[in-house]
Image: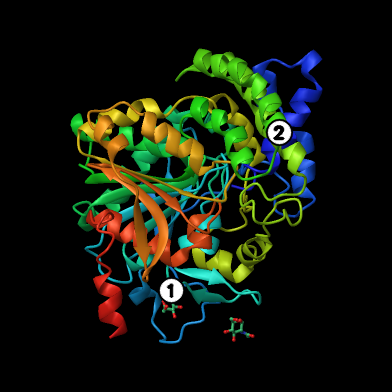
Amino acid sequence: MNSFSRSFTSLFLIILFNVSRLPSVDALLRAPPISAEKLIGALNLFPNQPINIVDGVDLPFIGRKIAERRFSFPNLIDPSGVSAEELGHHAGYYQIQHSHAGRMFYFFFESRNSKEDPVVIWLTGGPGCSSEVALFYENGPFKIANNLSLVWNEYGWDKVSNILFVDQPIGTGFSYSSDRRDIRHNEKGVSDDLYDFLQAFFEEHPELAKNDFFITGESYAGHYIPAFAARVHRGNKEKEGIHVNLKGFAIGNGLTDPAIQYGAYADYAFDMGLIQQTEHDRINKVLPLCESAIKLCGTDGKISCMAAYLVCNTIFNSIIARVGDLNYYDIRKKCEGSLCYDFSNMEKFLNQKSVRAAIGVGDIEFVSCSPTVYTAMLMDWMRNLEVGIPALLEDGVKLLVYAGEYDLICNWLGNSRWVHAMEWSGHKEFVAAPEVPFEVNGSEAGLLTSHGPLSFLKVHDAGHMVPMDQPKASLEMLKKWMKGSLSEWNGDAEVLVSSI
Ligand SMILES: *[C@@H]1O[C@H](CO)[C@@H](O)[C@H](O)[C@H]1NC(C)=O
Ligand SMILES: *[C@@H]1O[C@H](CO)[C@@H](O)[C@H](O)[C@H]1NC(C)=O
């Protein structure tokens, strides 16, 4: 998600600067975003190579699609002394089927509660940011202490699910290829790879295939998640492979319907007192042009999508120019350092020899956020991913859209608007449904609107990364949503019982 910050602004500025001699889209996609890399590289959060292109290195797949190992992190502070076997923690590579030499890295943590718990997959956005950002700073089993020890996360999502953290698209995190042709440019490439991975994963773990399955993620995953959900649903319908028990998908502070969400930037910034009315009106003058550019881009446009990206991002950049060093993932905070958040402990942690040996990644450079993957996906940015969702709702696959209220970049207002505007058979009832408090631990943690398979949750006291800012509420949200009891808002029975 942090390239979502840096590259977002810097790349755009570079492009805008050169607008008189705009390179062809192909050239743009082939060329690494040099200045963005320089900027990012200076922060020591990015590797020397913009993408993990690895020659002559491979892992022992021994005729299999998946090479997976049980492991335990060497620096885990572990009061009860459980073994790697008991932990049920796995790291693996999947040999991507429809690729030349793509290898997808993932972590798989068995539930601390029960193997019967649902299987959940988490996707971090970017595009091009590693899901390890979430693993170590949001909803993984542990957090990194300042001395680089790992401490258990009391609110890790592995408490209620068997959870997968996947590095994708190819070139992200520890995922790699030795062939540049494997770089993905759109949601078809992304969702096919994820579907193929899931099939291989359930082949490897057939006992889990019968469990409920949920897709979750954040930020640019507002694109990945609906595409992946639709891909899984189609695979099920067409009896393509192992049946996946897809029950729902959840998008946290995502970018899903750009036309509506870009229209909400200035309104949100004005509502939150970041800009004046006159600035709001001036910034939104470009909105009609942005909206028609997005319309041209549609769901599968090409060069028109690049045009839309250029035009529409003047809105976001004008706001950023007004608000200075504000953290646009959390407007309560200042942007500390050029990344707004400091994730350097993760880099330090994952670059330790003992850690790399434990998870079997060899010398592969860890990419927190890959500028190459980001740039390669630029034409995907403005495409509307809302269009595939109604069909899923009609077939009973449920959707939760949640958003921390202090995030600007994928703000709750834009998300609420597209969710409310979406046409499906329950549209009228959803729009008429009351907003009710979502209570956690006896206090209001958010405001919930739901009808049938669709829920929208505005999360209080949180920015872009909800599980980081509100770990307990986010775990409660996941647990209740998966059980279908998210809207039972006044019955906090469990809390009562445990505090008796
Ligand atoms: C490292 O930090 C953790 C958490 O603050 C602490 O429990 C642990 O004792 C520390 N380890 C060392 C070796 O200082
Ligand atoms: C839950 O509520 C109790 C009582 O108000 C409080 O002491 C505790 O810190 C709360 N826990 C969390 C995680 O918010």
Please say if 110 is above or below 65: below
* Residue bearing the label numbered 2: 317
* Residue bearing the label numbered 1: 154
Looking at the figure, which quarter contains the C terminus? Answer: bottom left
Colour scheme shown: rainbow
Callout 1, which amino acid?
Glu
Q: Residue at x 63, y 32 (%)?
A: 375
Dot 2, crowdedness within 10 Å: few (<14), some or many (≥20)? some
User: Would residue 160 be visible to someone looking at this image?
Assistant: yes
Please say if 21 is above or below 44: above
User: Would residue 102 be visible to someone looking at this image?
Assistant: no
Callout 2: CB less than 8 Å from ligand 2: no
Q: Nearer the viewer, residue 54 or 185?
A: 185
Q: Residue at x 33, y 31 (%)?
A: 389
Please say if 23 is above or below 196: above
Whole-percent x, y for residue 289 in the image: 61, 15
Callout 2, which amino acid?
Asn
Q: Please count the marks in the image.
A: 2
Whole-percent x, y for residue 29 in the image: 65, 25
Q: Quadrant of residue 193?
A: top left
Residue 253 relative to residue 497: left or right: right
